[in-house]
Image (cartoon, grey):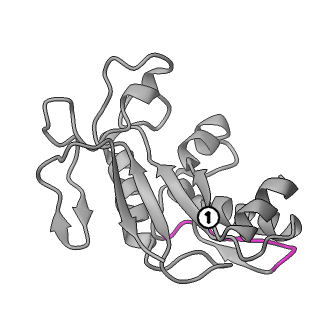
Amino acid sequence: MVDIARHLASTSAPLLANVYPYFAYSSNPRDIKLDYATFQPGATPVRDAGTGLVYTNLFNAMVDAMYFALEKAGAPGVRVVVSESGWPSAGGLAATPENARAYNQGLINHVAHGTPKKPGPMEAYVFAMFNENQKPGAETERHFGLFYPNKTPVYPINFAGATLAAANHTNSYGFGGH
């Protein structure tokens, strides 16, 4: 990791990271609360004993873990870009349209604020634009889309005050900035 981190720093390139609180939650629902994993208001905050930083959602804790790892690797200036994040709407534990909407809307609303370690706007991409009903693997993998293959919304979602009503022809939707 050290060589990669230093290369990213020397080329001013970001670290692209897929951040999926869903998988952390679904593998340990006893210790990770659903409201903490899905950006819900009122989630019990978690204080990092080493830094004193307070985390109100799992996404921030996961992203900041990458920033701390980059610092430890000697590359504190490398920016983290969340290249994929999302929540499935079917096929697994807590994989419902309501939870998928809560997570994705929370993510969209959150990116303008950043993390406790790196406040300010951040760049992130929702995975995915469409459900992939023929994708192999776990059932959840077919249900990360904002839209069904026929282009109807799986659930309502709002990007920067404008409801996303029609699909474009990509499989991710980016937002945020740096």
Residue 45 lies left or right of residue 175; in this view the side is: right
The residue at 44%/44% (across/down) is: 87
**Image coordinates for residue 96, horizontal then vertical, percent:** 36, 38
Is 44 placed above or below 135 here?
below
> Is residue 53 or residue 159 the one in the foreground?
159
> Is residue 153 or residue 132 the one in the foreground?
132
> Is residue 33 or residue 58 the one in the foreground?
58
Residue 70 forms part of the magenta stretch: no
> Is residue 121 or residue 7 the one in the foreground?
7
Q: Report the span colored magenta.
A: 42-51
Q: Main secondary structure of the magenta part?
A: loop
When asked about the image quadrant of residue 95, the answer is top left
The residue at 57%/60% (across/down) is: 59
Callout 1, which amino acid?
Answer: Pro
**Image coordinates for residue 22, horizontal then vertical, percent:** 54, 44
Is 147 placed above or below 84 here?
above
